[in-house]
């Protein structure tokens, strides 16, 4: 009896855990949502395209950031975080998106009824810093080792001189 109660509780817990993910993964048949670049550079525009919606049907694109600490000002879809656009006569809606801060973003396209048409994840890497101009085509790395080598050579010569002086003193004391 207790075993059966535990199995029912485990099945109910599994259903609660997996039910929301199944609902999120659902895309109405015939709809597709794609992005032109899943890893754009910060500040580089890319497009999100929704196909399969009816002609002149409104489609909403919503962008959310992860982590949530990225401000909405880093997200630009024609100047907004969510934007609704009407599909053309072929049932295609195209959004131009610019993300100016590094992070992971989720783009969600939904139909006029609020049904999720599709989701895409876009990862924006931090913009690489431009190398400092040095006047030559190659960057300069390492250090100039000549002063260090010269100092080491001088120390070797001083050490050899000290050994010679010590041997002369020793031979002078032995002979006397």
Image: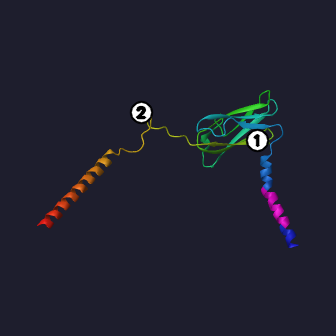
Classify residue 113 as left or right of residue 157. right
Q: Position of residue 56 (x, y in %)?
A: 79, 30
**Residue under label 1:** 118
Question: Is residue 149 covered in magenta?
Answer: no
The extreme right residue here reads 1
Mark 1 residue crowding within 10 angstroms, few (<14) / some (14–19) / many (20+): many
**From which residue to which does the magenta span run?**
7-17
Viewer-proximal residue, 116 or 30?
30
Classify residue 176 as left or right of residue 158. left
Secondary structure at badge 1 equals: strand
**Quarter of the image containing the N terminus?**
bottom right
The residue under the point 85% across, 72% down is 2
Q: Position of residue 17 (x, y in %)?
A: 78, 57
State the mark number for residue 21.
Answer: none
Q: Position of residue 162 (x, y in %)?
A: 21, 58
Q: Position of residue 85 (x, y in %)?
A: 73, 33
Q: How many numbered marks appear? A: 2
State if disc 1 and disc 2 touch (CB < 8 Å): no
The residue under the point 13% across, 65% down is 175
Classify residue 55 as left or right of residue 162. right
The extreme top residue here reads 89
Viewer-proximal residue, 39 or 149?
149
State the separation of the CA atoms marked 2 and 1: 49 Å
User: Which dot, 2 or 1, sits closer to the camera?
Assistant: 2
**Residue under label 2:** 136
Does residue 176 sit above or below 88 in this rendering?
A: below
Secondary structure at badge 2 equals: loop
């Amino acid at each position: 009896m207790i075993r059966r109660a535990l199995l029912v509780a485990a099945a109910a817990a599994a259903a609660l855990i997996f039910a929301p993910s199944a609902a999120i993964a659902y895309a109405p048949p015939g709809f597709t949502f794609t992005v032109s670049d899943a890893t754009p550079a910060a500040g580089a525009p890319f497009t999100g395209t929704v196909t399969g919606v009816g002609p002149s049907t409104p489609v909403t694109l919503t962008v959310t950031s992860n982590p949530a600490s990225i401000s909405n000002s880093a997200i630009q879809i024609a100047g907004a975080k969510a934007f609704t656009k009407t599909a053309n006569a072929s049932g295609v809606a195209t959004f131009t998106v610019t993300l100016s801060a590094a992070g992971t973003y989720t783009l969600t396209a939904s139909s006029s009824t609020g049904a999720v048409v599709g989701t895409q994840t876009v990862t924006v890497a931090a913009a690489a810093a431009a190398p400092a101009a040095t006047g030559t085509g190659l960057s300069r790395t390492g250090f100039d080792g000549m002063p260090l080598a010269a100092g080491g050579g001088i120390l070797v010569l001083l050490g050899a001189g000290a050994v010679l002086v010590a041997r002369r003193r020793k031979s002078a004391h032995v002979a006397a």
